[in-house]
């Protein structure tokens, strides 16, 4: 079952990013030694506990959150996805690669004690500084690239939600009507708190509400959404070249985080239609 989900995500969700990123990984380990620890288990399994929630078992021990709570998730498929992250670990646990586990921990522990309304406001604050709404006036090549690549995704969102967003070359950005923001707020209110944690995570990665909703609503795939979020950087790379493995590693990491966040939102959605479609795909 899980293979069908991973087939939709980019290859960076699978172990191994290649030799070119090993330098960056070594640097990460040097700076953040606490993000790794020796693997202490052999078998990973899932079980259904009281109330119907699903638990992760590491050998005979139940997984706990950083705050010591029992690690439980609302669906079996999400439990399988999390268990796969733990099962894929080698001799050491690389927590910085376990994005689904991190998102579940955030939803369970809620370390900042945010309400659903606060989660929605945190997500929508990016709308006023949305990546695709800020345009350059030069060079001409980048101006045309932004218009050709970003205008369609803005128009798609405007038509789908009957809102006005627009774009601007001003440092203040576009003047998005209050009614449009209220429409987005109402739409996000239809998500449960777990899904909102994932949606805010995606928006933070892409720095764009517009791209994130295009992605969640399946108008864009992960690779395209990430590419559009890095359009100016990609333009500069094509003009001046990249820093060998560094840019490639950053791209792989962004794809991995965005793919995990997208999967998390869909698996946490209360809509059985979404889950059924994922299984069909």
Image (tube, grey):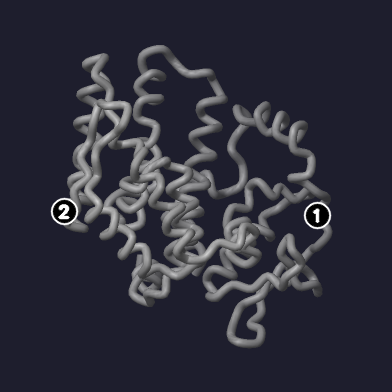
Residue 88 place in picture, x, y as percent: 66, 55
Task: Estimate how packed mark 1 is, as few (under 14), some (14 to 19) or many (20 or more) residues with alpha carbons within 10 Å.
Answer: few
Q: Is residue 229 above or below residue 1?
A: above
Q: Is residue 17 above or below residue 194?
A: above
Residue 121 place in picture, x, y as percent: 42, 55
172 sits to left or right of 21: left
Evaluate whether residue 7 shows in this view.
Answer: no
Q: Residue at x 56, y 49 (%)?
A: 14
Tell me the element at label 1.
loop
In this rendered view, identify the residue nearer to me: 240 or 41. 240
| Quarter of the view holding residue 135 | top left
The disc at residue 214 is none
130 sits to left or right of 152: right
Task: Estimate how packed mark 2 is, as few (under 14), some (14 to 19) or many (20 or more) residues with alpha carbons within 10 Å.
Answer: few
Q: Residue at x 46, y 67 (%)?
A: 267
Residue 2 place in picture, x, y as percent: 51, 65
First in sequence: mark 2 vs mark 1? 1
Residue at mark 2 to residue at mark 1: CA–CA distance:
50 Å
Q: Which residue is mark 2?
A: 159
Q: Which residue is mark 1?
A: 39
């Amino acid at each position: 079952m899980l293979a069908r989900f991973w087939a939709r995500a980019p290859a960076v969700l699978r172990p191994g990013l290649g030799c070119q990123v090993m330098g960056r990984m070594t640097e990460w380990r040097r700076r953040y030694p606490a993000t790794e620890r020796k693997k202490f288990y052999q078998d990973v399994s899932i079980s259904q506990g009281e109330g119907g929630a699903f638990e992760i078992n590491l050998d005979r021990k139940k997984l706990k959150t950083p705050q010591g709570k029992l690690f439980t998730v609302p669906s079996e498929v999400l439990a399988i996805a999390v268990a796969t992250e733990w099962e894929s670990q080698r001799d050491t646990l690389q927590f910085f690669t376990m994005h689904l586990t991190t998102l579940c921990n955030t939803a369970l522990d809620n370390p900042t004690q945010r309400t659903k309304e606060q989660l929605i406001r945190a997500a929508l604050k990016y709308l006023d500084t949305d990546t695709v709404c800020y345009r350059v006036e030069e060079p001409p090549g980048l101006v045309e690239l932004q218009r050709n690549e970003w205008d369609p995704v803005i128009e798609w969102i405007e038509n789908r939600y009957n809102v006005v967003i627009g774009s601007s070359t001003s440092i203040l950005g576009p003047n998005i009507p209050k009614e449009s923001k209220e429409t987005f707020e109402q739409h996000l209110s239809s998500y449960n708190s777990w899904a909102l944690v994932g949606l805010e995570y995606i928006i933070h990665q892409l720095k764009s509400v517009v791209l994130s909703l295009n992605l969640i609503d399946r108008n864009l795939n992960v690779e395209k959404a990430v590419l559009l979020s890095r359009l100016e950087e990609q333009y500069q790379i094509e003009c001046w070249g990249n820093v060998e493995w560094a840019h490639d590693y950053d791209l792989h990491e962004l794809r991995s985080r965005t793919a995990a966040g997208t999967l998390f939102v869909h698996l946490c959605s209360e809509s059985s239609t979404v889950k059924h479609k994922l299984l069909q795909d």
